[in-house]
Amino acid sequence: MSLTKQYPGKPEKVYFFGTCLIDLLYPQAGLAGMQLIRREGVQVIFPQDQTCCGQPAWNAGYREQAEAVVLNQIRCFPEEYPVVVPSGSCAGMLRNQYPELFRDKPEAQQVERFSKRIFELTEFLVHVLKIELKDLGQPTKVALHASCSARREMDVAGEHEALLQQLENVQLVEQVRKAECCGFGGTFAVKHPDISAAMVADKAQAITDTGADQLVSGDCGCLMNITGHMEHQGVGPKGQHIASFLWERTHDPKS
């Protein structure tokens, strides 16, 4: 989080950007993210025509294809509501790379206006909704992995930690490699599989060594990479997106 960033007041409505991995592999994380926002009295709108944020095309050098994705996305979110994204990686693309992609182009101002409406989920919960969580779960130990994009590009690792620290029955245990990349990096894992495998092995071992009962991350790509490695090796805790973890710990099904 930038110390100079000005956050708006609580809105009546927000858009929710689902991300590809939430759509395909972790739908419960998306539902949980929307429920956390709705519980605070905010209407959540999920545009059905939204697609990939365009990051794979952009990272791979397919500029024209990425530009087409960007313009389609902007059309999907026409009103001036905040756009909440449950991923540091996708939020970073939407907020920071979209304007870069359209620099010196006729659509630059339109893209800039859209990008200023982007909020990573934990950032939105902490600074806009100022959410207060009541822990209803049993005592547990949690290791947090904040993605490279969440930690460096969006600067929201502290927001991840702040939300977990609100939960009185959750002990947040620190891993010695907490600031290191897990080795996924989208197309990086495909282009450099040996390096990626070595990086995730180090990360998984560091998490296992904490003795945590649960791994929590705000990015599904990292979660898939780390838990996939640990499951293959038969070690380490189960993993969960931070939205799912927060919702399960604080939702009373009787209420």
Image (cartoon, helix red, strand yellow):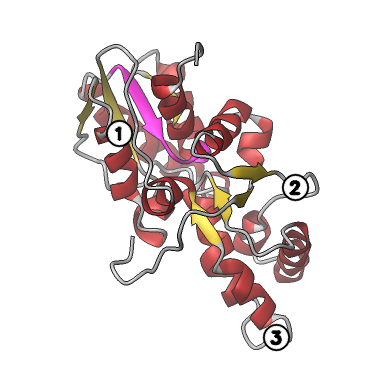
Residue 166, percent from left and from top = 27, 33
Few, some or many residues within 10 Å of mark 3 (<14, 14–19, 20+): few
Per the image, the residue denoted by label 2 is: 47
Q: Judge whether 52 appears above or below 61 on screen.
A: above
| Disc with the residue nearer the chain's start (3 vs 1) | 3
Per the image, the residue denoted by label 3 is: 105
- The answer to whether residue 30 is left or right of residue 212 is right
x 60%, y 30%: residue = 31
- Quarter of the view holding residue 66: bottom right
Per the image, the residue denoted by label 1 is: 164
Residue 175, percent from left and from top = 22, 34
Start-end of magenta stretch: 213-221
Residue 92 lies within the magenta run: no
x 43%, y 33%: residue = 242
Residue 64 appears in view: yes
Q: 202 and 151: which one is in front?
A: 151
